[in-house]
Amino acid sequence: MTKGNFWPDDIQGAVSLTFDDGAITQLDNAVPCLDDHRLKGTFYVNPGRKQDWTDLVPRWQEVSRNGHEIGNHTTRHPCSCNFKFSREGYCLENLTLADIAETIDDATEALDALFPEQNGNRTFCYPCYQTYVGEGEGRETYVPLVAKRFKTARGWGERPNFPEVVDLSYAWSWAVEGNTAEELIAYIEGASKKGQWAIICMHGVGGQHLSIDNNAFQGLVKHLDENRHRIQTDTMINIAEYILSKRSGEQRN
Ligand SMILES: [Zn+2]
């Protein structure tokens, strides 16, 4: 495979903008900005987890109908017991693979019912970027269980992804809370020069937890719009499907 020609036409690299935990500031601030610039994002939600979920469903349905991806982030968001917020013992060191499968499949069932236009075609995001159940000698990875169910899943990592080789069952992302537009643009430009897929991970936008401020977000989105002829910004599912089809085409040649 020749380096640099992985993407279509004049595209140098790809970007996915991803948002975790169904935060309302994503609906209030991120979605309108993306829509103004005709760009699509991936929103990883937890059906039923928080009290305001039911109230927000109609707004998420509108987002989905507009072509954004609504992704699976489990129903119960299990993370390490070492986090203070892992209450009531439902945390990774105490769970089994069957427990993880249940919270993932419950989310899939809820999302299938609420977002029928997706036809079940969505990606996964590891809560707290963590991929295991159990502890010590009994610790096991749940990545294979995710890989069986999803074309790609987003974790956390130190670099953008090389599309030729990235393990799609744990694609790396950069969590950008507190960064400026200039820093974000430098990151995606550096990735594009190498032909990479840069995945940006966000939580609150212009408020709420781990937030990026509105100016930084808007500056990034404006840059992605102005450079759309050479940087492809799309959902996780669309980029993953392109990567898979490109890889299978290369194998046939
Ligand atoms: Zn989360």
Image (spheres, rainbow, N blue to C red):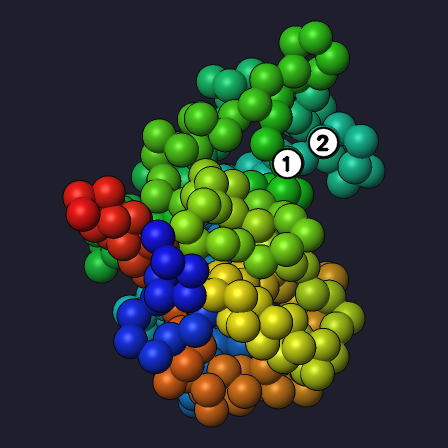
Residue at left offset 59%, top offset 82%: 220
Amino acid beneath label 1:
Gln
Residue annotated with mark 2: 80
Q: Residue furthest front?
A: 2
Amino acid beneath label 2:
Ser
Residue annotated with mark 1: 130
Question: Relative to residue 12, is residue 3 depicted above or below?
Answer: above
Asked if marks 1 and 2 touch (Cβ < 8 Å), the reply is: yes
Find residue 163 and report its image quarter.
Answer: bottom left
Q: How many marks?
A: 2
Image coordinates of residue 174 in percent, x first then y, are 64, 59
Image coordinates of residue 68 in percent, x first then y, are 37, 67
Q: Earlier in the sequence, mark 1 or mark 2?
A: 2
Residue at left offset 66%, top offset 77%: 186
Image coordinates of residue 156 in percent, x first then y, are 63, 48
Find residue 21 and report its image quarter.
Answer: bottom right
Report whether 116 appears left or right of 7. Answer: left
Distance between mark 1 and mark 2 Cα atoms: 8 Å
Q: Secondary structure at mark 2?
A: loop
Res 51 seen here: no
Label 2 near ligand 1 (CB < 8 Å): no
Res 91 seen here: yes
Image coordinates of residue 215 in percent, x first then y, are 68, 87
Q: Residues within 10 Å of mark 1 (few under 14, many from 20)?
A: some
Which residue is nearer to you in this view: 222 or 7? 7
The mark closer to the camera, 1 or 2, is: 1
Question: Relative to residue 242, is residue 225 depicted above or below?
Answer: below
Residue at left offset 53%, top offset 89%: 222
